[in-house]
Image (spheres, rainbow, N blue to C red):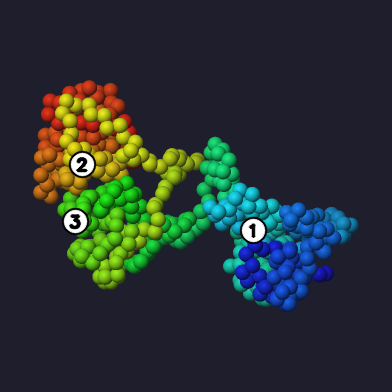
Amino acid sequence: MKKFALLSVSDKTGIVEFAANLIEHGYEILATGNTARVISENKIECTLIEKFTNFPEIFDGRVKTLQPSIFGGILMRRDNKSDQVEAEKNNIVPIDIVCVNLYPFVKVSSDPNADLDTKIENIDIGGPSLVRAAAKNYKHVSILTSPEQYSDFVNELAAGNISEKTRKKLAYEAFSHTAKYDTFIANFFEKEFDQPATDLRINYELLSELRYGENPHQQAQLYGNFYDYVDVLHGKELSYNNIVDLIAAVEIIQDLSGNSCVIVKHTNASGAAVSDDLLDAYEKALSGDPVSAFGGIVAFNGTVTKNIAVKLNEIFLEIVCAHDFDSDALELLKQKKNRRLIKIKKPLITHRVIKEIPGGIISQNYDSSSIDDLEFNIVTKFKPSQEELEDLKFAWVICKHTKSNAIVFVKDKKVIGVGAGQMSRLDSAKIAASKAKEHGHNLEGAVAASDAFFPFADGIIEIANAGIKSIIQPGGSVRDEEVIEAADEKNISMVFTGIRNFKH
């Protein structure tokens, strides 16, 4: 009995060699239009689908493989007598190998120059149907969906028959292939036609295995296209914790303007500053908490130059991240082989925050609130000066990115004290003051930011007693009047923003 293989691929990589190998092993090639053309141009014999089915391709190729003789040949159960009888009665012959990859919808749909009709025409119909049919009948049919599969498949074919273990693996990969494809299409239609998001579809390919997760006993993986956003210019591979901290650092500087620098430890800013000069911004950020900076991640909103690199080399840092590095700076920084040097290629944009829970997931929009969203409602008798107002804005940005309960002290656009992740906001205020004093910062005239309202006046009193002259907070407590009264009694100003920035 003749052995048939069906080839219909959008990506023609390796298809000529693959077809030649199949012919060497006794298969006759059936192929669709462009695939058949490429194979034939390379002097390899194949049969057009329309000649095999005795039915032409129609509607500009929209219909070519959706035929009983094709799907019957793929789906018939070779060990089922009833199927054998029906196949013979209807002149259906088995097709044992199906090689299909799909129209490039993902690429075309992301092309800003492609119109809607072009995008729609790149939604494959027959291809996914062939793939699913072949994968469903994996006991008898091998389905290949990627050129990367050809070599191993041919080697196994040369050694004998394709094992059921291989066919199962190929079937799994095939269904994963079509599931991903359909997810992209569904996401496209949801966005293009402004439909409500009733399902959450997550569709990322495995990019790499990470060394481990938060701790050495935890496995971790990286999915998606993260390296479209950053380049690792130097150093050992990024770890799970490196990636989490790196994103935290970049998200902070993306919310800051001008020459800014942030130093992050465990997703919180241990130091941050804005200055007219990027080196000065780094030195100010480092001075905020030079002890915690050890082993931290430094991110710059600008280009790292040699004079900055000299300073960076004075302490141990896990990662240095910037929009760019000049050649002298790179040469100097690369002297430490393990330190990672990261270039930001494009803004890091997060749309959703997702966390797995037993039985499902919880999801929320990313907190994209900005300075422009704030009300700046001054609720006290005393008003902040213009300099204090600028410091309050800076403090609010840092506080937004600090784990709750968060209190951040700032002076001259430099972080000088941080209290993060405490069960009590009062404790966070005490820690922020303690850290500032530990590193020799003068709190007189500094400002404070809180990521949520103060439930009691004690937090305001603690902050005012430390020397703080102005506070920015969301407001909204049932005791706001008591809190405002405490601020007035301490002769400090306070601004309500109307926006809370909890970060759990």
So how many labels did they put on this image?
3
Residue 82 position by quadrant:
bottom right
Q: Quadrant of residue 13?
A: bottom right
Residue in the picture at 78% in, 58% down: 57
Determine contact: label 2, label 3, CB under 8 Å: no
Residue at mark 2 to residue at mark 1: CA–CA distance: 54 Å
Q: Name the residue: 86% across, 55% down.
A: 86
Local crowd at mark 3 within 10 Å, few (<14), some, or many (≥20)? Answer: some
Q: Residue at x 30, y 44 (%)?
A: 401
Q: Amino acid type of disc 2?
A: Asp
The picture places residue 161, in percent across and down from the top left corner, at: 70, 71
Q: In this orientation, does residue 434 appear?
A: yes
Mark 3 sits on what residue?
Answer: 280
Residue 468 position in % (x across, y down): 14, 37
Looking at the picture, tell me which residue is in the foreground, 19 or 73: 19
Label 2, residues with CA under 10 Å away: few <14, some 14-19, many ≥20: many
Q: Quadrant of residue 194?
A: top right
| Amino acid beneath label 3 | Asp
Residue indicated by mark 1: 102
Residue 421 located left or right of residue 29 = left
Q: Is residue 256 left or right of residue 26?
A: left
**Sequence-wise first label, 2 or 3:** 3
Please tell me whether mark 2 or mark 1 is closer to you in this view: 2
Image quarter where the C terminus lies is top left
459 shown above or below 287: above
Helix, strand or loop status at disc 3: helix
Q: Which residue is mark 2?
A: 391
N-terminal-most mark, 2 or 1: 1
